[in-house]
Image: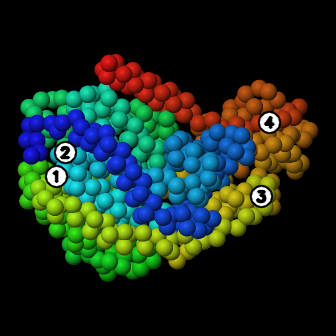
Amino acid sequence: MSPGPHTAPDSAATDGGSRPERWTGWLLAVVFALLFGLPLLFNPDRLGLGDWDYFTSWSLAERTSLLQYGRWPSWSPWHCGGMDVAANVQGRAFSPSFLLVLLAGPVLGNRLWCLLALALGFEGTRRLARAIGAGRFGALLAAIVVAGNGGVFLKLGAGHLGEIPLLLVPWLLLGVRRAWDAPARGALGAGLAGALSWLEGGVYPLIWGFLIAGGWSLVASASRRSLRPLLGFLAASGATVGLSAVTLWPVLGYLPGHLRSASAPESVPALALVQALLARGQSLTGPAPWPDLPWRWHEYGAYVGPVFVAALLAGGVGAPRRALPWLLAALGFGAAALGDHGPASPWTLLNRLPILEVLRASGRLLQPALLCAALAAGVGLDRWGRWAALAPVLLALDLWWTGPAMLADAFPISLEAPSRTPFVQVLDPRHRETLVRAHYTTMTQDVLANRGILACYEPARPRIAAEPRHPRPEVFLEGVPEPVSLLSWAPGRVEVGLPDLERDAVLVMNENAAPGWRAVVDGAAQAIRPDRGRVAVQVTPGASRVTFVHRSPRLGPGLGISLGTFLLLAALAWRTRR
C-alpha cells in the first residue's frame, strides 16, 4: 500500500529504494545507456548534423585555448568576431562535462557526456518515481520513458545539447523533495543538479524543472498545511542560483540587448501531437509531422508507443489520487506543446514571461510533459501484480527498436585536419546554413584552421564589429602605413611590437571590443578606446610593445558566489546530518 496524501514515503523509497536496489538501479542505468546510446560511439571522428557543429566548435575553441595556448577559456576569437566564453549562455567550459572534452576531444567527449546523461536521466527518474510512491516496476517504466522516448534521440541526433539537461530534472526534483524535510541537504542536491543543468546550457529545461517543482511544493504545502515544502523549494531555488553564479553572473551582464528574436507563432494540430507520440518512422531528415509546421521531427517527435499509453491508463487506475496531480501537469505541458491557439493558450501565456518571450518550437514541451506522465504511470503500475513486471520489458523493447535507429545516420560529416594558419577573420555564408538539415555549418572546421567566423550562428545575437580583413593584418595602426609585428597570439591575449612612431596613433585589433579587455603599453595599463566597436588603444611616439588581454570582468565575482554557496550549503548539510 502506498502512503496516503499526507504521509511522506519512507526514507528508503525517498532515496530510491534500499541500498541493493540503488546499486542495481545504477547498473541498469549503465546498461540502458550503453544499449540505447551505442550509436553515439559509432563514427567517433565524424561531425553530426544540425547543431552538433555549433556545440563542437565551442568545445574545440575552449579545449584549444587551454591545451594549446595554456589559457583558461576566457575569450573565443573564433566566434562572431570574438565572444566572452563565460557570458555565452550555451558555453560549457565551466561544466564538469568539459573534462570529457579535454580527455577525449570535442567530438567524442560531447558524445560521452550524452551517454552519461542517459544514465543519469534513467536513474534519476527511477529514484524520483520511488520517492513519490511508485513500486519497483513502475519506477523502471518511468525511467525507460523519460530517458528512452524518441524525442531524446531526435535531440541527440540534431545536436540539441542544450535540451539534454532535461535528463537532469529528476535529480532537481529529488533535491526539492528532500528540502521539504531537510532544507540544507535537499537544497545542496537540488542546487547541484540545477547548476549542472545551467552550466550545460539547459536554460529552458531548468525553467521547466522549477515550474514542476514549484507546483509540487505548493500542493505539498496545502496537503501538509505547512509552509515547509514551499520554504524548501525557495532554498533549492536559491542554492541553484548561487551555485550557477560562476556563469550566471556573466550571462546576466551580457544577455540584455542580445536576445534573439522570437520565431513566428506556430499552431500544432492535436492530431500532429498524437502522431508525435505514436507514429513510427520519425527521423532527422524526414518531412515535418504535419503540413505547414515550421520544424521537422527533431522539434516535435517524442515516440512513446502504445505500451506506454496502456501503462499510463493502468497506473492512473491503480493509484488515481497519486497519479492525478502528475497527470494534470502532463496535460498542462502537453497543451503548451500545441503552440499558439489564441491569446489564452498556455504557449501564448508563456511567451509573455521574461526570457520565455523568445521561446520557440513548442514541441519541446513534450519532454517535461512525458516526465510528468511517466510519474503518473509509475505510481500505480505495481498494483497490477505480475503484469506490472511485463510492462517495462515490453516498453524497453519497443523504444529500443525505434529510438537508437534515429541516430544511425546522425554523424555523416568528415572533419578534415587543415594546417593552422595565422589567425584571420573570414566571412563565409555557409555558416548561416545550420538550421537546414541538408547542409551544415563549417564552424568547427574553421576553428581547426584558426579562422574567425563572422557570418556566425549564435542564439545570443552578438554585435559583430570585426571585419574580414584578409590579406591585410588583423592588428594594425589606423592611418599609419608601417606594419606592426605580431610577437605572440593566443585566445584573449595578443602581443605586438610597434614601429617607430612620429605622432600619436590608434592601434586596432580586429576583434569585438567587450568588457574585460585591457591594454598594457610598455608595462603600463592603459584604457581601451574602441574603434568602431573593435578593440583599440591610443599609442604615443616612443611606445614599443602593446599587449591586449581579456579577462571576463564578472567571472571572478560569480566564481566567488558559487564557491561560497557550496561551502555554506555543505557545512549546513554536514551539521544537520550529524
N-term-proximal mark, 4 vs 2: 2
Q: Residue at x 38, y 62 (%)?
A: 152
Q: Residue at x 50, y 71 (%)?
A: 410
N-term-proximal mark, 2 vs 3: 2
Query: Alpha-carbon distance for marks 4 and 2?
Result: 62 Å
Query: Alpha-carbon distance for marks 2 and 3?
Result: 55 Å
Dot 1 corresponds to which residue? Answer: 379
Mark in front: 3 vs 4: 3
Dot 2 corresponds to which residue? Answer: 132
Labels 1 and 2 touching (C-beta < 8 A)? yes
Labels 4 and 2 touching (C-beta < 8 A)? no
Question: Would you call the spot at circle 4 few (<14 residues within 10 Å), some (14-19), or many (20 or more)?
Answer: many
- Marking on residue 546: 4
The answer to whether 27 is drawn above or below residue 576 in the figure is below
Q: Could you tell me which secondary element the residue under label 2 belongs to?
A: loop
Query: Alpha-carbon distance for marks 3 and 4?
Result: 24 Å
Q: Which sits in the foreground, 100 or 339?
A: 100
Mark in front: 2 vs 3: 2
Q: Quadrant of the C terminus?
A: top left
Q: Residue at x 60, y 55 (%)?
A: 106
Labels 2 and 3 touching (C-beta < 8 A)? no
- Badge 4 amino acid: Val
